[in-house]
Amino acid sequence: MADAKDLMARYVSGDATAFRELYALVAPRLYGYLVKLARQRSVADDLLQQTFLKVHRARATYVLGADPVPWIYSIAHRTFIDEARKQNRAVVRVADDDVLPEEAADLAGSTADRRDESRVDPELVRDTLDALAELPASQREAVILTKLDGKSVAEAAQIAGTTVGAMKVRAHRGYERLRALLGGRGNREEAS
């Protein structure tokens, strides 16, 4: 069986059998990943089909010679996030008597979840995002996957197409570089 790069290159050039082989090669592992994310096989089934449909539509943007597996995993991950957001927006919870529930608020009208957000220093957020943008791409990806997206190191390594050890090194170096760029600013904020 051919490798994923060769199959993707053949598929992009119009070989329909290459897509079937690529699907057979990538789909089982990708399905397992989606089951872990979605926690429901039926949802993972739909996400898998949506992912490969998006791969089909985006095949012209694939960079020939690149490993398509991380690209496909990224598409799957974004598809999951989009679906989860859609589901969260679609849910409207109404009490049995059709009265909308009220959330407790303080005197200023802030709910508990908004009060937590108001404690975040917008300048610190901006500085952190700027510092994140200065990281090398591999370190930035590792920090985003492990800290912001909440992936385990193993999941992040699988998405990035690297080893667990390499992902640990990238993430550690990214954290250290962020600390250096921010100059310990986040620690001072927490202390006050």
Image (spheres, rainbow, N blue to C red):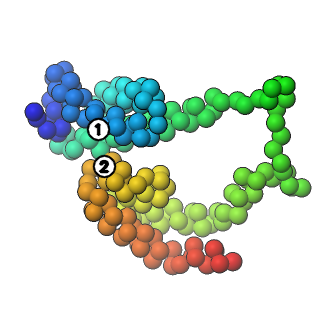
Question: Disc 1 marks which residue?
Answer: 29
Identified at 17% across, 39% down, the residue is: 5
Q: Amino acid at mark 2?
A: Gln
- Near mark 1 (Cα within 10 A), the count class, few <14, some 14-19 or many ≥20, is few
Q: Residue furthest right?
A: 107
Spatial separation of the CA atoms under disc 1 and disc 2:
10 Å
- Near mark 2 (Cα within 10 A), the count class, few <14, some 14-19 or many ≥20, is some
Residue 102's place in the image compared with 124, above or below, is above
Q: Secondary structure at mark 1?
A: helix
In the rendered image, residue 134, in percent from the top left (x then y), is placed at 41, 65
Q: Is the C terminus in the top left, top right, bottom left or bottom right quadrant?
A: bottom right
Picture quarter containing residue 48?
Answer: top left
Q: Secondary structure at mark 2?
A: helix
Q: Residue furthest left?
A: 1
Identified at 80% across, 26% down, the residue is: 96
Residue 112's place in the image compared with 53, above or below, is below
Q: Is residue 60 left or right of residue 178?
A: left
Q: Is residue 105 visible?
A: yes
Q: Is residue 14 visible?
A: no
Q: Is the N terminus in the top left, top right, bottom left or bottom right quadrant?
A: top left
Identified at 60% across, 67% down, the residue is: 124
Question: Disc 2 marks which residue?
Answer: 158
Q: Amino acid at mark 1?
A: Arg
In the rendered image, residue 119, in percent from the top left (x then y), is placed at 70, 64
Picture quarter containing residue 168?
Answer: bottom left
Q: Are marks 1 and 2 in contact (CB under 8 Å)?
A: yes
In the rendered image, residue 162, in percent from the top left (x then y), is placed at 26, 54
